[in-house]
Image (tube, rainbow, N blue to C red):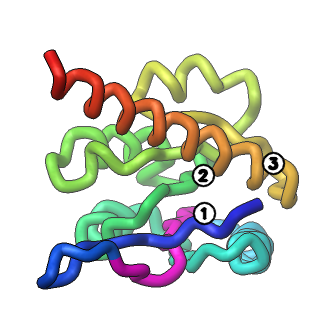
Amino acid sequence: MNTLVAKHVDAEHRIVDAGPKRVLVVDDDQHVLDAAEALFISEGYLPILIGSPQSALQIARSMQPSAIFLDVLMPGFDGWDVLAALKADSSTCTIPVVMISMPGERGRALEAGAMGVIPKPLDAPKLRAAMANLNSAHKGASRMRYLSSFR
């Protein structure tokens, strides 16, 4: 799998690598965070790991990750609450979110604005598939913006 690299435009309008893409992982289970960290690093991403769902919106606003992997079952402010807050905020509403949940919750997750669902336990094939889906969706959206500019 190719490593995703963030790009930005410098003062001379050249595209420059900005390092590995940041991925925010929100889960109250430290074992899941540890596994996610190892998996994302091995795939060439820079994981940002948080165990507090209450902090997810602020961190997403400030860090602007390329994607957010969000656990559903957390005490208090659960993943559905975090997803709703992310999608309601103009600074985070376009960040793709993948819910870490039961496969039967896929429909609910998509209706709520998530780009996909990945079941626990996390493993490299599931992670690769989720990131490939996000990349395909991003490329499709970029192509649609490009094509619509000719209308």
Residue shown at 17% from the left, 74% from the top = 13
Relative to residue 111, is residue 113 depicted above or below? below
Q: Nearer the viewer, mark 2 or mark 3?
A: 3
Q: Nearer the viewer, residue 116 or 51?
A: 116
Q: Quadrant of residue 66?
A: bottom left
Q: Which residue is mark 2?
A: 71
Q: Nearer the viewer, residue 110 or 65?
A: 65
Disc nearer the start of the sequence (2/1): 1
Answer with left or right where residue 122 lies relative to residue 33: right
* CB-based contact (under 8 Å), mark 1 and mark 3: no
Q: Which residue is mark 1?
A: 27
Q: Which residue is mark 3?
A: 126
Residue shown at 61% from the left, 74% from the top = 45
State the extent of the magenta-drawn residues as a range. 16-26
Res. 85 visible in picture? no
Q: How many numbered markers are drawn?
A: 3
- The type of residue carrying mark 2 is Asp
- Residue at mark 1 to residue at mark 3: CA–CA distance: 17 Å
Q: Main secondary structure of the magenta part?
A: strand
Q: Nearer the viewer, mark 1 or mark 3?
A: 3
* CB-based contact (under 8 Å), mark 2 and mark 1: yes
- Residue at mark 2 to residue at mark 3: CA–CA distance: 15 Å
Disc nearer the start of the sequence (2/3): 2
Residue shown at 27% from the left, 69% from the top = 58
- Numbered label attached to residue 122: none
- The type of residue carrying mark 3 is Lys
